[in-house]
Amino acid sequence: MINIDPPIVMFSLFVLYGLSGYVLYGWRKAKGQQTSVISTSTDEPDERGLHK
């Protein structure tokens, strides 16, 4: 498929990858799950000392 028109195929893949973040955000928001990729928990043992 990439041999057909490499610039168009590569650009399309780039756009799809870029939009996938917004799709995942919307999906998680609709399901009521946490949408932040930044850790906000201070109770987790792995994250002690990160929020000072």
Image: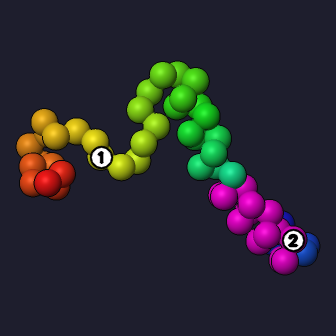
Residue 7 visible at all: yes
Q: Residue at x 54, y 29 (%)?
A: 29
Residue identified by numbered label 2: 8
Q: Position of residue 13 (x, y in %)?
A: 73, 63
Residue 3 visible at all: no
Q: In the drawing, does residue 51 fall left or right of residue 13?
A: left
Which of the image's four quarters has the C terminus? bottom left
Look at the picture and state if 4 lies above or below 45: below
Residue identified by numbered label 1: 39
Q: Position of residue 38 (x, y in %)?
A: 36, 49
Look at the picture and state if 11 lies above or below 31: below
Q: Nearer the viewer, residue 52 or 32?
A: 52
Is residue 35 covered in magenta?
no
Q: In the drawing, does residue 19 fall left or right of residue 9?
A: left
Q: Nearer the viewer, mark 2 or mark 1?
A: 1
Q: Position of residue 12 (x, y in %)?
A: 80, 63
